[in-house]
Amino acid sequence: QLQASGGGLVQAGGSLRLSCVASGGTFSTSVMGWFRQAPGKEREFVSAISWVGRTAYAGSVKGRFTISRDNAKNTVYLQMNTLKPEDTAVYYCAARSVPTMATMPSGFDSWGQGTKVTVSS
């Protein structure tokens, strides 16, 4: 089970940190990912981190977002800086039991409920 939190309303240029706590499963060896879905759009990849700390980012967020994980707390984070209105979406965390990186939603087994991020201009 995945529980995401940390969303909210922020002005353009601001920052937010999303958290996702995992319960059950084998968090320490799972690839964890963040995806987002804006109204009327498909769910898209944002970032992922492997159990050894290898990371991947979508081009649109690279250099602004940072993913990290704390295996002792079964938690993955997404630090979002220099937010833009186009970052507005519901953000979902996801877990992949196969310990290889993936960027497609179909590659992830478990999903959190989503946390809404709204960036005003």
Image (cartoon, rainbow, N blue to C red):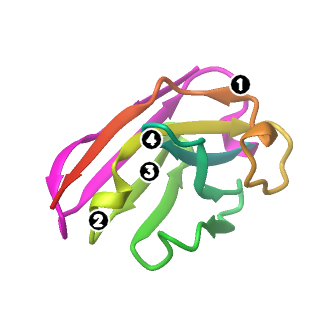
Secondary structure type for disc 4: strand
Q: Which quarter of the picture shows residue 39? A: top left
* Residue type highlighted by circle 3: Tyr
**Quadrant of the snapshot with the C terminus:** bottom left
Q: Which mark is residue 77?
A: 3
Identify the magenta region: 1-29
Mark 2 or mark 4, whichever is nearer to me:
2
Which residue matches tag 1?
A: 25
Secondary structure type for disc 3: strand
Query: In the rendered structure, which disc, 2 or 4, sits on the residue that comes first in sequence?
Result: 2
Tell me if 40 is positioned left or right of 110 in this view: left
Q: Which quarter of the picture shows residue 27? A: top right
Asked if the magenta segment contains residue 13, the reply would be yes
Which residue matches tag 4?
A: 91
Label 3 – label 2 distance at C-alpha: 19 Å
Query: In the rendered structure, which disc, 3 or 1, sits on the residue that comes first in sequence?
Result: 1
Q: How many residues crowd mark 1 within 10 Å: few (<14), some (14–19), many (20+)? A: few
Query: In the rendered structure, which disc, 4 or 1, sits on the residue that comes first in sequence?
Result: 1
Residue at left offset 80%, top offset 36%: 97
Query: In the rendered structure, which disc, 3 or 4, sits on the residue that comes first in sequence?
Result: 3
Which residue matches tag 2?
A: 84
For residue 103, above or below residue 84:
above
